[in-house]
Amino acid sequence: MPNLKDIKRRIKSVKSTQQITKAMKMVAAAKLKRAQDDITAARPYAEKMLDIMNSLASRVRPDAHPLLSKRGGNKIEMLVVTSDRGLCGGFNSNIFRAAEGFIRKNGDAEISVNIIGRKAKDYFKRRDMNIRQERTAGSGRPKYATAAEIAQEIVDSYIKETFDETYLVYSEFISALSQKPVVQKLLPVEPAKVEEISGEYIYEPSQEAILADLLPKYVEVQVFRALLESQASEHGARMAAMDSATKNAKEMISSLTLTYNRFRQAAITKELMEIVSGAEALKG
């Protein structure tokens, strides 16, 4: 028969864990609301900027700006955005699967990684990947200044031909229960398909001047969007994971309590039978 003290101790331990997971769920829910508002406000601007850049890239010469030039080399860099902490379900593992799929698809390329988040750092270091840059994701809300700094470094490295293409790998926020890993080409800017082009553009003062101003801003905005999407996805995934953990703890507590009561009742019954048997023996 199991020790009743051990079962009682386990119930207490699971209840403590349940309190932690419930608190973490509430914190993640509060942070998710702010992060969801941030990405809802930023996403339309980022998407429109992407459309404009793709459209402009299809109308100008490839040599109009260095960030439009296709070199045909095989040096690729991935900017991978993950979290610093775990306990967020499959959030990080889904990003790693997307990154691994991209690496397998481009097996002949020389791939380096630019990392945001401790989880990505640990993952790619274990696999001996070429890590060119690494940063922590941070616990606060993403700042545009941080995205601008990352984007500036990427632009400078691309112009210096450190790599020939760069891709963003992050988790796109769909809802609190759904996040989608995304692999997005960042540089060089991809021209839009012919059927997607509409309208005419008049460039003032010139194509070169417009592109020189807009292209670095485009990279900043896309990186900032990736940071916002990733943070909202992380909070949503953590909230769902902690909600599931809290429910599992509740079920485990019910099961352990039932087991405890069953064995306690068996122990009491056994003691009563021993008392009755002793009383009968004394009468005899």
Image: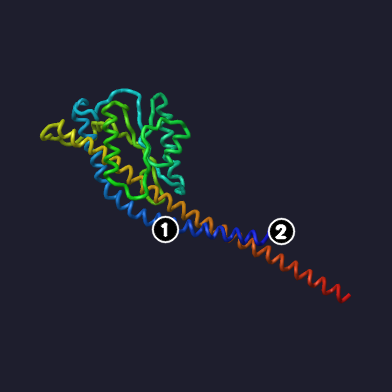
Query: Which badge, 1 or 2, is on the more N-terminal residue?
Result: 2
Instruction: Where is residue 65? Give x, y as percent.
Output: 20, 29
Q: Is mark 1 on a helix, strand or loop?
A: helix
Q: How many C-alpha atoms fall within 10 Å of the one at disc 2: few (<14), some, or many (≥20)?
A: few
Q: List the residue tagged with mark 2.
A: 1
CA distance separating discs 1 and 2: 39 Å
Q: Amino acid under label 1?
A: Met
Q: Amino acid under label 2?
A: Met
**Residue 174 is at least partly visible in this image:** no
Q: Is mark 2 on a helix, strand or loop?
A: loop
Determine the residue positioned at 82% across, 72% down: 278
Which quadrant holds residue 181?
A: top left
Between 106 and 124, the one nearer to me in the picture? 124
Q: List the residue tagged with mark 1.
A: 26
Residue, far left:
205
Q: Is residue 17 left or right of residue 48?
A: right
